[in-house]
Amino acid sequence: MNALSEEKFLLVNQYIGLLETIEEAFGHIFLCLEDLMFEDAENLWDDILAAFWQIYQSNQVLAEHFFDRPGILSQFENFESVLEKAQPMQNTDYILWEGIIGEGIYPAFSEWSREITKQFRPYYIN
């Protein structure tokens, strides 16, 4: 196991926790859309976007801590493709949300999340 300072350990654990929370939020969005609870889905989407911004900012901080880990750095760069998938959601009709999220944004996030989690696995306790 790779030893981390307490600060790095806490950062990585919080980061992984945020990824898990986003995963749960996506599940709730799908339930809201299924039940035609569009306002709730929109609130969850706003929360996910805020979390995406937090990930983006955290990637910049963590890149300084993991500058010697090209696999991690590569995944930080790959997160931008997740952000690009989220762009079509602006001013989109709720009826299209399930397709855009379910076929584009969520799969991109889920795949990216699995990969960054694999990269961080030696550094955190799940």
Image (cartoon, grey):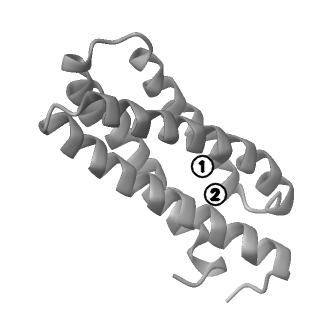
- 117 versus 23 height, above or below: below
Q: Residues within 10 Å of mark 1 (few under 14, many from 20)?
A: some
Give the image location of residue 40, x and y in percent.
33, 37
Image quadrant where residue 109 sits: top left
- Give the answer, above or below, for where 93 lies relative to 76: above
Residue drawn where x is 51% and y is 58% of the image: 19
Residue 8 vertical position relative to residue 60 in the rendered view, above or below: below
SS assignment at label 1: helix
Left or right of residue 59, residue 61 in this image: right
Could you tell me how far apart the alpha carbons at marks 1 and 2 are, in whole angstroms?
6 Å
- The answer to whether the residues at label 1 and label 2 have Cβ atoms under 8 Å apart is yes
Whole-percent x and y of residue 73? 70, 51
Q: Write down the residue under mark 1.
A: 75
Q: Quadrant of residue 41?
A: top left
**Which of the 4 image quadrants contains residue 51?**
top right
The three-letter amino acid code for the residue at tag 2 is Gly
Q: Nearer the viewer, residue 62 or 74?
A: 62
Coordinates of residue 55 in the picture (x, y in percent): 64, 47
Q: What residue is pinned by disc 2?
A: 71
Task: Kindly identify the residue that appears in the image at 13 percent across and 38 percent down.
Answer: 35
**69 or 22: which is nearer to us?**
22
Residue under the point 43% across and 59% down:
114
> As drawn, is 14 to the left or to the right of 28?
right
Query: Badge 2 local density, few (<14 within 10 Å), some, or many (20+)?
Result: some
Which amino acid is tagged 1? Gln
Q: Is residue 87 above or below residue 41?
A: above
**Which disc number belongs to residue 43?**
none
- Name the residue rendered at 16%, 31% in the picture: 36
Mark 1 or 2: in front is 1
